[in-house]
Amino acid sequence: MVCRVSISVFLNFLAGFPLVPALVGLFAVSQIMRDALDRDVGPRPPKQKIGWRAMLPPAKGLIGHLPNATRSAMIGTSVGILPAVGGGPAGLISYAQARNTSKDPGSFGKGAEGGVVAAEAANNATVGGALITALTLGIPGDTVTAMLIGALTIQGVQPGPLMFSNSPEIVYAIYTSVMVASVMMFFFMLGSTNALVRLLEVPKPILLPGLFVIACVGIYSLNGRMFEVWIMCGFGLLGFLLEQYRYPLAPVILGFLLGPPLESNLRQMLGQYESMMPLVTRPIPIVLLCGSAVFVVVSLRSRRKQKLMSREADG
């Protein structure tokens, strides 16, 4: 019996760690653990009814966040074009860039508006980027576009360059549905503002166990495997320990997401060129490397500026 269980666990580990349980564990379960151990509950927020007008930011705030939203949207679109990457890395990269370029990076992780704008703008922009590769090349950018390509193929429509000339009505229908869905989501969030704010009134002893149960049920419902629930709990414990020792979770997720495609594409490149030289001789890799170098330099300058400001404040 013990041998049979060991073989089953070993076979599950051979398939690798699934993405969704790892993400839920690192971000949701670890946060539940930290909130459960936080005894500084503080005063409960007063009961108040918040209307849809409270959700609309002032015009000055919209203009102030416009550069951050534009940069994050460009990052999200660029990441969305890459096959099988999705919105997770785009949000994390945009959040990191917004934090590095912010005048108050210490407010990030505490509800800073810049972090919310960066993550959401990049996450929403990946939809358009994924549709670009899905409709023009027939390559799915994420799970949703893979399902879209499958549905189109079942109906006898082959996504690709010829789709725009053979079935233009389907292309325009997809464009229209994306725009209508964005508008409908906007009005839905405005109408549900009061119900969402009421969640803050739920006490932690009730809210946290309920969130954990919902997470377990959601992960189990994906593939019906209890192994993925244990993976979620394991990554939750890992995220909790990393946060306790002040290690950021974003690099872990980026490595987890980008590691497999990086390895497979690198293996494909080596099989074709038998050398690493195309990484530094072809135009597209050179542009990407230069962009990465610029981001690294900006991050180092921002960190150095923060250290100088902290020294001046202490001195």
Image (tube, rainbow, N blue to C red):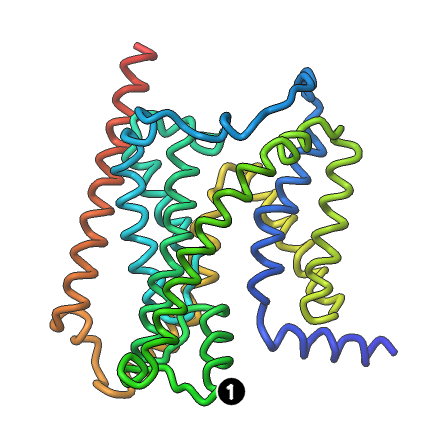
Q: Nearer the viewer, residue 51 or 31?
A: 51
Question: Where's the C terminus, which quadrant?
Answer: top left
Picture residue at 35% right of the left edge, 61% below the top: 128
Q: Nearer the viewer, residue 239 or 195?
A: 195
| For residue 205, side relative to residue 14 (left or right) | right
Picture residue at 37% right of the left edge, 42% below the top: 118
User: Does residue 103 sit above or below 314 in this rendering?
Assistant: below
**Corner quadrant of residue 276:** bottom left
| For residue 169, side relative to residue 66 (left or right) | right
Q: Residues within 10 Å of mark 1 (few under 14, many from 20)?
A: few
Looking at the picture, how far across and down is residue 232, in whole percent? 66, 57
- Label 1 residue SS: helix
Looking at the picture, how far across and down is residue 237, in whole percent? 65, 48
Residue type at mark 1 is Ile
How many callouts does the rendering have?
1
| For residue 308, side relative to residue 33 (left or right) | left
Q: Nearer the viewer, residue 262 or 163?
A: 163
Question: Where's the N terminus, which quadrant?
Answer: bottom right
Residue labelled with disc 1: 154
Q: Nearer the viewer, residue 1 or 251?
A: 251
Picture residue at 31% right of the left edge, 50% below the top: 73
User: Does residue 183 sit above or below 141 in this rendering?
Assistant: above
| Residue at far right of view | 1
Looking at the picture, how far across and down is residue 96, in whole percent? 36, 43
| Residue at far front of view | 169
Looking at the picture, how far across and down is residue 165, in whole percent? 26, 83
Picture residue at 31% right of the left edge, 33% below the top: 65
| Residue at far top of view | 315
